[in-house]
Image (cartoon, coloured by chain):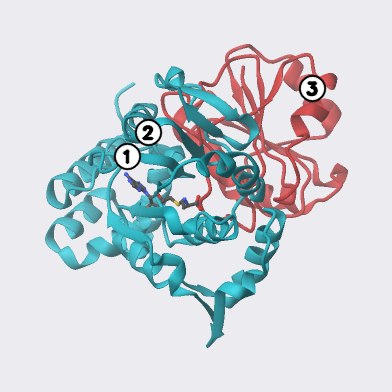
Amino acid sequence: MPDKTEDIELTLLLEAIYRKYHYDFRDYAMASIKRRLKQACAYFECETYSQLQDLILHDESVFPRMLSYLTVQVSEMFRDPSYFLALREKVLPHLHTYPSLKVWIAGCSTGEELYSLAILFREEGLEDRTMFYATDINTEALKKAEAGVFAMDRIPLFTENHRKSGGKTSLSDYYTAAYGAAVFDKTLRQKTVFSDHSLVSDAVFAEMHFISCRNVLIYFSRELQNRAFHLFTESLAHRGFLGLGSKENINFSKYRDAFQDFSRVDRIYQKV
Amino acid sequence: MPVIVVVHLPRDKESVLSEIFSPKCKLPVVEVQDKEPIMNGTIYIAPPDYHVLIEKNRFFSLSSEEPVIFSRPSIDVLFETAADAYGSALMGIVLSGASPDGAAGLKEIADAGGLAIVQDPATAAASVMPEAALLSCPTAQIMDLRRLSDYLKSFSETRVCA
Ligand SMILES: C[S@@+](CC[C@H](N)C(=O)[O-])C[C@H]1O[C@@H](n2cnc3c(N)ncnc32)[C@H](O)[C@@H]1O
């Protein structure tokens, strides 16, 4: 069957974005990219991907807005509380045996996962020896992560999740309410390095003891997932931990054998 | 043929649907996994709190994009991506339900040459969903559950049904 015109346009659009802005979405899982680019077409009032391509190539100011369609910024604090409970009960006791720790939150989005981990590490007495690296390709999201301000109406869910994750303190200890927003304590991020880093095109930057990469790989093709798993394998210290999203797994990857299941239901793996 | 099922449930419900359906079905019933190849003769259930999308090379992708019409998983997201991947080799069925999710997607299935079927709203426990589907896709065939089940049994091996 010949390619649909729309699919030809889609390939060309992603190629144009790559050449002009060096963001490489060419190997992402296309069904989702397509849905979101249709929304972008509607927003920018373009009939076709070709019109959108024309706009993106000739008006650089629209690209940041485009990036918010190309990446999915859905997150929450202590998302899937059982994951954080498993970290607390099973992984952190291992991490206690190291004098210093490096933790990488890959695809940190607007920071919810980072603050969750910072609180968890503080509660478990590991914060002082830990450096956090929070990375993403969406620089707008990174700025928000660095600010650590979340809408007040999201706090009841975060609080409930924190409690279910075995939280030893009250979430309200970590933020102050101001103008309908919860402003998180800046000491939570004093040991965090925020940086623009892509799992698709960038390299190893430090040796990690724990990598948490959740709900990022589902947007990748299998080949790209393999690239990311390769990066994680290279980045992790011997017997380091890798945590994925609740519906992600490495079973279909060629790096399966580099890891053993550590807590299978919670998608936590250990490098062998 | 593969069968892919979306049921709306509260997000914090554990995914027990495959366990409920398994003993009642001759075909294997499994929950969709990300980047899993789609196999004939298997019934796939959408996991709670994730959209299920069909890739052109016949893989599943999951996504935690925003809910669509308050639903994640969304029937529209499944139908639209399935219509794009399978074209006319696809059957879409909308059953009882209390939201208009699925209506837009069913139209896309019909527009791509696939077969659209809607449960007779008069026989549905909740008629909002089949009524919305018929409004958006008036060419859909209307069946009650008995006829639908006979119809599906008579079906060839090659089709995909969502
Ligand atoms: C759905 S959010 C996940 C947020 C958080 N990890 C969680 O689970 O709640 C996905 C994030 O992955 C980022 N992302 C997409 N492609 C990426 C890439 N190639 N490298 C790094 N991050 C990427 C997006 O910008 C987005 O912030």
Q: Against A219, is B20 above or below?
A: above
Residue underneath mark 1: A207
Q: Are marks 2 and 1 in contact (CB under 8 Å)?
A: yes
Q: Specify the quadrant that holds the N terminus of chain B.
A: top right
Q: Which of marks 1 and 3 is in front?
A: 1
Three-letter code, disc 1: Glu
How many residues crowd around disc 1 within 10 Å: few (fewer than 14), some, or many (20 or more)?
some
The one of A240 and B17 positioned closer to us in this rendering:
A240
Inspect this view and state whether residue B162 appears.
no
Element at badge 3?
A: helix
Query: Residue at image x 24%, y 43%?
Result: A24
Image quadrant where residue A261 sits: top right
Query: Residue at image x 25%, y 41%?
Result: A9
Chain A image colour: cyan
Q: Which chain is red?
A: B
Element at badge 2?
A: strand
The one of B94 and A68 positioned closer to us in this rendering:
A68
Query: Residue at image x 50%, y 40%?
Result: A97
Disc with the residue nearer the chain's start (2 vs 1): 1
Q: Alpha carbon of mark 1 to alpha carbon of mark 3: how far?
A: 45 Å
Q: Specify the quadrant that holds the C terminus of chain B.
A: top right
Q: Against B3, is A77 above or below?
A: below
Please give left or right for residue A172 compared with residue A138 in the image: right
Q: Alpha carbon of mark 2 to alpha carbon of mark 3: how far?
A: 42 Å
The one of A34 and B29 positioned closer to us in this rendering:
B29
**Label drawn at residue B22:** 3
Three-letter code, disc 3: Ser
Q: Mark 1 lies on which chain?
A: A
Q: Do the residues labelled 1 and 3 touch (CB within 8 Å)?
A: no
Residue underneath mark 2: A237
